[in-house]
Image (spheres, rainbow, N blue to C red):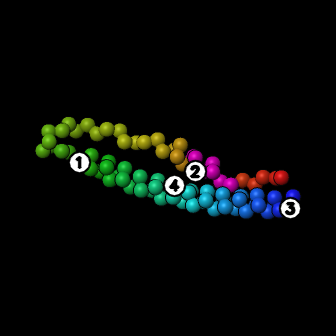
Amino acid sequence: MERLNSKLYLQNVYIMKENERLRKKAQLLNQENQALLSELKQKLSKPNKANGASNTVPDLNLNLSSTNNNNSNNHPSSSSN
């Protein structure tokens, strides 16, 4: 029984480390997406008279709150055995 507990403990530690690694990666990707979105908004806000394009700018306000909420809900929680 103690051997099984040790094995499960090690698996849990591995999963928590992997979860933290993926959380950090998700944060970096989110930051990159925000920077790219800002850059795109700046480019689209400049009038493009050479192409005869209209001055309407599409709404680029993406709903990223669900991504942020998913990241905050992934914190490891303690469980009792």
Looking at the image, is 27 positioned above or below residue 64? below
Q: Position of residue 79 (x, y in %)?
A: 78, 52
> What stretch of residues is rendered in magenta?
69-76
Res. 2 mark? 3
* Side of 9 relative to 55 (left or right): right
- The amino acid on which the numbered mark 4 sits, given as a three-letter code, is Ala
Q: Residues within 10 Å of mark 1 (few under 14, many from 20)?
A: few
Query: Going from the N terminus, do you reach mark 3 or mark 2 first?
Result: 3
- Cα distance between the residues tagged 4 and 1: 31 Å
- Cα distance between the residues tagged 1 and 3: 66 Å
Q: Residues within 10 Å of mark 4 (few under 14, many from 20)?
A: some
Query: Going from the N terminus, do you reach mark 4 or mark 2 first?
Result: 4
Query: Going from the N terminus, do you reach mark 4 or mark 1 first?
Result: 4
Q: Position of residue 16 (x, y in %)?
A: 66, 59
Q: Quadrant of residue 12?
A: bottom right
Q: Are marks 1 and 3 in contact (CB under 8 Å)?
A: no
* Label 2 sits on residue: 71
Q: Residues within 10 Å of mark 2 (few under 14, many from 20)?
A: some
Q: Are marks 4 and 3 in contact (CB under 8 Å)?
A: no
- The amino acid on which the numbered mark 3 sits, given as a three-letter code, is Glu
Q: Residue at x 48, y 59 (%)?
A: 28
- The amino acid on which the numbered mark 2 sits, given as a three-letter code, is Asn
* Label 4 sits on residue: 26
- Cα distance between the residues tagged 1 and 2: 34 Å
* Label 1 sits on residue: 46
Is disc 3 placed on a helix, strand or loop?
Answer: helix
Looking at the image, is 42 positioned above or below residue 54? below
- Cα distance between the residues tagged 4 and 2: 8 Å
Q: Residue at x 63, y 51 (%)?
A: 74
Inspect the magenta stretch and tell me whether residue 72 lies in it.
yes
Q: Are marks 3 and 2 in contact (CB under 8 Å)?
A: no
